Image: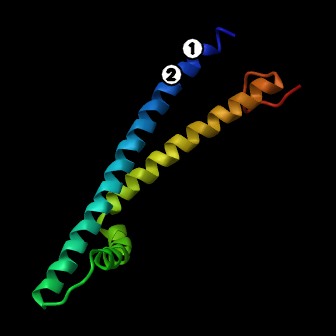
Amino acid sequence: MSDATPPQGEPKQQTAGAGARLARHLALYTLARLGLVVVITAAVIGVAWLVSVEIPLVVAALFALIIAMPLSLTLFKKLRARVNEDIAVVDAKRRQDKAQLRARLRGNDNPTGSAS
């Protein structure tokens, strides 16, 4: 049992790094999208003020959300790609850990091998 413990420790550190990287990239992507909504909201209110029309903040924010959704897909394509890559790494590690756990529950140490 102690022979199986050290190899599992190293991938968990890699997963922790991938998980932290995922959290950082996801937070950055979320902040970028929220910032875009704020900028568009300010632009809508500014344009309304210039043409002497009063638009409630909630309405301007809703318009900004609608505009920002598709716009953020193109503006923040690299950030979204990084998040997707990090999700794939974390998901692959989770699948590998799940396969190892199932193999240990079956009684063999090799997750790809068949039980006798």
* Residue 39, x across and y down, in percent: 21, 69
Q: How many marks?
A: 2
Per the rendering, the mark at residue 102 is: none
Identify the residue at the far left of this view. 50
Are there few (<14), some (14-19), or many (20+) residues within 10 Å of tag 1? few
Residue pointed to by mark 2: 10
Residue 39 in the figure: left or right of residue 94: left
Front residue of this view, candidates 24 and 17: 24
Residue at point 63%, 39% (across, down): 95
The image quadrant of residue 6 is: top right
Quadrant of residue 99 within the rendered picture = top right
Whole-angstrom CA distance, mark 1 to mark 2, is 7 Å
Quadrant of the rendering where the N terminus is positioned: top right
Disc 2 marks a residue whose amino acid type is Glu
Left or right: 22 with respect to 32?
right
**Mark drawn on residue 6:** 1
**Residue 35 image point, x, y percent:** 26, 61
Please tell me whether residue 90 is drawn above or below residue 84 in the rendered image: above
Q: Quadrant of residue 103?
A: top right
| Residue 81 spot, x, y in % from top left | 40, 56
User: Under tag 2, what secondary structure?
Assistant: helix
Which residue sits at x=29%, y=58%? 32
**Regarding mark 1 in the picture, which secondary structure is present there?**
helix
Q: Are marks 1 and 2 in contact (CB under 8 Å)?
A: yes
Q: Nearer the viewer, residue 47 or 115?
A: 47
Callout 1 amino acid: Pro
Residue at (45, 49) in percent of width and height: 85
Residue closest to the eye, 63 or 77: 63
Q: Quadrant of the C terminus?
A: top right
- Above or below — where is 106 with respect to 69? above
Give the x, y percent position of residue 8.
58, 21
